[in-house]
Structure formats: structure tokens, C-alpha cells
């Protein structure tokens, strides 16, 4: 076992960087409506192989908007369910189609594949370009399929700050509360990508911001796959994940 990953207990897949939103708070910057996406079969193999060696406690799929490639998402979650990973999460903005039949089909597939928590991103930023009524319908279908769901909003400055964006976010969350979807702690926006470009006035000049998702490269708890299959200097489309793990060394 590679000493740098001896505490590995979580798997993440960035399914695609393509997105249906054009959010000014996005840390990744501008997105396109299509693009490279994870190979679900390769992802599922990696999940099974990792679970054969490590005690994986959680798996998450996200993007971009992962449900643009829902079939790949389901393949990964099916493998996670079969391997007994307890927490199997999906982050989505809930907008991948306007067709209600397609929405019903996708949500049913998610339930069948074993997704056991959906974090639904809706807030002032997402709803500038994403129709609220479609996301509300998605939320209703998720509830009917019995998948646990919580809202996962983005807050500006802090959760308590009363800037116009946070005020609008609370109004939007109220619409979901009416259909009995509660709100998680959400996230406070990190100044990167579009957030620094469009919301710079809300960040202090010269202040040092720590990315809450950064890990110690010499003690990784999470392995995160990019849409093209790359991970830790290798790629699961050509390399075995356990060989990639064995070869990993943190950058000097």
C-alpha cells in the first residue's frame, strides 16, 4: 500500500466540466454546453478495484453538470452500491433537460443505481440562468423516488451576510422548503475563476483565502478523477488504478 494514500477513504468523479449554467460564482470559470466526460465503465472498474484494497466510505459524482451524462453517473453509482460504499452522493443543479419525461427517467435511474443522497445546487447564482420551475420539478421527482435530497446553496462572504445575492438565495430556498426539501450548510464562495472575475468587490484585497477542498498531497484521503479519466499522474482509460496508486508520489 502506498504510504501517501494509506488513509484513502473517498472517491470523487468530476463527470464533465460541461454545464447548463453560466454562474458568476463558479470557481472553474466559463463552461461550455458539451465536452469531455468520464467513461462510466472505466470509472466503475476503478471503483471496484479501489474497494478491493481500501475501506471506501463515500463516493461523489459532480461536475459541471453530471446529469448531462446520466448513464455514466449511474454506472459508477451501481459499482459503488455493489461494493458496499455507505455514502453515495451526487451534486447537481437539477437542470439537464426541460422534458419532464426525460427528467422522470433520469431520476428513476439514479434511484435504481443506488444514489443515496442528492445535493441540489440552487441559489441566486444558478437561478440567473437556470429555470427555477424545472429544478423544482426535478426536486419533486427525487422525493417521489425516495432519494434523500438537500439543497446545497452557495453563499457570498458568509452564510449570514445580507448582501443582495444571499437575500435572493434565501428566497429561492424558501420555494424548495415548500416541497419539503431542507437545506444543508452549503458552501461559502471561494475567490477563484468566475467568482474573482465577477464578484471581486466582495473579497478583501490581499487577504489569504484557503481552499477548503485542498488536501495534504502526502496524506491523501480522496482520489479524484477528472472527466478525461486522469488521476494522480495516470489515466484509468489506459492504466490500472492500482498501478497509478502504487506509482504516485507527491510533488516536491
Image (cartoon, grey):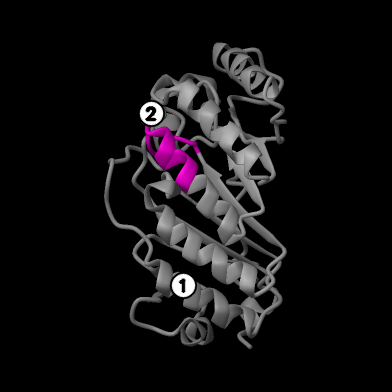
Q: Nearer the viewer, residue 205 or 185?
A: 185
Q: Which residue is rendered at x = 69% and y = 72% of the image?
A: 84
Which numbered disc, 1 or 2, marks the residue closer to the eye? Answer: 1
Q: Dot 2, how many residues are within 10 Å of its Cα: few (below 14), some (14-19), or many (20+)?
A: some
Q: Which residue is rendered at x = 68% and y = 71% of the image?
A: 56
Q: Secondary structure at mark 1?
A: loop
Q: Is any part of residue 240 visible from this angle?
A: yes
Is residue 142 on the magenta stretch? no
Placement of 89 over or under 185, stated as above or below: below
The residue at which mark 1 appears reads as 232
Is residue 102 on the magenta stretch? yes
Indicate the quadrant containing the N terminus: top left, top right, bottom left or bottom right.
bottom right
Q: In the figure, residue 220 lies in which quadrant?
A: bottom right
- The label on residue 63 is none
Q: Nearer the viewer, residue 182 or 166?
A: 182
Q: In the image, residue 182 lies at what x, y percent?
A: 72, 31
Q: In the image, residue 156 lies at what x, y percent?
A: 58, 25
The residue at which mark 2 appears reads as 197
Specify start and end residues of the magenta stretch as a single range: 93-105
Amino acid at each position: 500500500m502506498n504510504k501517501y494514500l494509506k488513509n484513502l477513504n473517498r472517491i470523487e468523479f468530476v463527470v464533465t466540466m460541461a454545464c447548463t449554467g453560466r454562474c458568476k460564482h463558479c470557481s472553474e470559470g466559463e463552461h461550455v454546453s458539451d465536452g469531455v466526460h468520464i467513461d462510466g465503465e472505466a470509472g466503475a472498474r476503478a471503483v471496484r478495484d479501489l474497494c478491493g484494497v481500501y475501506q471506501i466510505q463515500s463516493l461523489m459524482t459532480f461536475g459541471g453538470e453530471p446529469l448531462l451524462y446520466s448513464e455514466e453517473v449511474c454506472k459508477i453509482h451501481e459499482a459503488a452500491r455493489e461494493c458496499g460504499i455507505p455514502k453515495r452522493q451526487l451534486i447537481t443543479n437539477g437542470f439537464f433537460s426541460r422534458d419532464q419525461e426525460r427528467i422522470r427517467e433520469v431520476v428513476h435511474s439514479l434511484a435504481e443505481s443506488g444514489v443515496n443522497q442528492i445535493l441540489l445546487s440552487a441559489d441566486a447564482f444558478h437561478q440567473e440562468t437556470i429555470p427555477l420551475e424545472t429544478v423544482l420539478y426535478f426536486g419533486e421527482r427525487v422525493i417521489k423516488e425516495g432519494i434523500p435530497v438537500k439543497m446545497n446553496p452557495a453563499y457570498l462572504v458568509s452564510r449570514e451576510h445580507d448582501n443582495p445575492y444571499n437575500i435572493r438565495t434565501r428566497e429561492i430556498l424558501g420555494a424548495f422548503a415548500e416541497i419539503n426539501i431542507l437545506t444543508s450548510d452549503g458552501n461559502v464562495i471561494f475567490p477563484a475563476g468566475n467568482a474573482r472575475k465577477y464578484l471581486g468587490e466582495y473579497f478583501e484585497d490581499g487577504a489569504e483565502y484557503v481552499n477548503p477542498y485542498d488536501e495534504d498531497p502526502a496524506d491523501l484521503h480522496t482520489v479524484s478523477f477528472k472527466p478525461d479519466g486522469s488521476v494522480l499522474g495516470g489515466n484509468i482509460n489506459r492504466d490500472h488504478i492500482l498501478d497509478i496508486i502504487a506509482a504516485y508520489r507527491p510533488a516536491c
